[in-house]
């Protein structure tokens, strides 16, 4: 009886072992490289795959940023699962990694361990040849090229400030239409409401005060500060001296003003202010804080010193009497 019991146990253990062995033979793991040789800093794809029955579960090795101290993972791809049409019930699961290395020589990708239930399956290690980058020492070393200078014409300036130019032109047109309408409409009924026309000097001073209140240069908007400051002065010059200041360069403005009655100090202040504005807008000059404030003071002083003096009523009466 005892020998018969021992024989039964042996047969049972044999079939259990045979079942585990059969299951293990149905699971295969593999690791391979798309390129086994790369240049230093180049990339290749490492593919980890497992072939197993559909009903079986398997855990892939957990990889993060590095495979070894000399092999880094650049990017981890998605896990792909493909069924084998020639082998029903068998699937292939693949996980891909883009890897790189910056150490020349033969780098070894170690074996990876997969787990299915209580069983472990390991791949073989893979060599990765990393070739050093060749440097041609016979060629001279050149300096880095400087940035190319880009021309900036008045057309480019108009493209950057067309809103201000168009707005100013529209304002002039609207004022002209209003004035024409008020003068030409029939004077019947109650007296017409006359829209007061702001003198050019007061209009310019109001705009300069608005620019100062915005604190543009204090907030780092240097180019915008000088662009708006220059626009106000050019508009004033057009109204005061009847020149096309908005369409001319600074040098062309000075050329047209050479015969105009103007204090020499104010002429010098105007030149300093417009030249500095050009340097900021076109040459990316960074003036000192004192220069920014001084430009505003020059602009305000220029308008106050060059504004047209109003004709007093008694002067008008005297002139009519003489005539």
Image (spheres, helix red, strand yellow):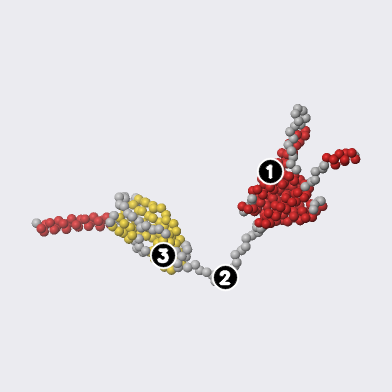
Q: Pointer 2: what residue?
A: 139
- For disc 1, the marked residue is 167
The C terminus - image quarter: top right
Which residue bears the numbered disc 3?
69
Residue at (77%, 34%) from the top-left corner? 183
Picture quarter with the N terminus: bottom left
Q: CA distance from mark 2 to mark 1?
A: 58 Å
Which one is in front, 246 or 116? 246
Q: Are marks 3 and 2 in contact (CB under 8 Å)?
A: no
- The tag earlier along the polypeptide, 2 or 1, is 2
Q: Is residue 244 visible?
A: no
Front tag of 2 and 1: 1
Residue drawn 74% across the image and 51% down it: 301
Above or below, 245 against 44 in this view is above
Q: Kindly identify the residue that appears in the image at 21 percent across and 55 percent down.
A: 16
**Comes first in the chain, label 3 or label 1:** 3
Kindly report which numbered mark, 3 or 2, lies closer to the viewer in this rendering. 3
SS for dot 3: loop
Q: Residues within 10 Å of mark 2 (few under 14, many from 20)?
A: few
């Amino acid at each position: 009886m005892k020998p018969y019991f021992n024989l039964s146990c042996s047969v049972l253990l044999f079939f259990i072992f045979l079942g585990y062995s059969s299951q293990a033979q149905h699971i295969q793991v593999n690791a391979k490289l798309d390129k086994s040789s790369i240049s230093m800093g180049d990339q290749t794809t490492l593919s980890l795959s497992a072939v197993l029955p559909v009903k079986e579960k398997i855990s892939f090795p957990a990889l993060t940023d590095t495979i070894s101290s000399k092999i880094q993972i650049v990017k981890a791809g998605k896990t792909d699962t493909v069924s084998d049409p020639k082998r029903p019930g068998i699937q292939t699961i693949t996980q891909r990694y883009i890897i790189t290395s910056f150490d020349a020589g033969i780098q070894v990708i170690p074996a990876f361990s997969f787990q299915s239930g209580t069983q472990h399956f390991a791949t073989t290690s893979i060599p990765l040849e990393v070739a050093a980058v060749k440097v041609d020492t016979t060629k001279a070393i050149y300096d880095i090229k400087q940035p190319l200078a880009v021309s900036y014409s008045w057309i480019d300036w108009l493209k950057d400030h067309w809103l201000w130019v168009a707005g100013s032109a529209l304002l002039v047109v609207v004022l002209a239409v209003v004035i024409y309408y008020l003068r030409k409409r029939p004077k019947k009924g109650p007296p017409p409401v006359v829209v007061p026309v702001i003198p050019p000097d007061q209009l310019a001073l109001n705009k300069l005060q608005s620019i100062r209140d915005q604190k543009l240069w204090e907030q780092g908007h240097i180019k915008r500060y000088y662009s708006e400051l220059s626009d106000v002065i050019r508009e004033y010059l057009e109204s005061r001296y009847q020149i096309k200041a908005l369409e001319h360069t600074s040098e062309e403005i000075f050329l047209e003003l050479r015969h105009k009655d103007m204090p020499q100090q104010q002429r010098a202040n105007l030149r300093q202010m417009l030249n500095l504005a050009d340097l900021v807008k076109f040459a990316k000059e960074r003036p000192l804080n004192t220069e920014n404030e001084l430009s505003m003071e020059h602009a305000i002083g220029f308008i106050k010193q060059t504004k047209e003096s109003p004709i007093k009523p008694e002067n008008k009466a005297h002139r009519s009497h003489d005539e």
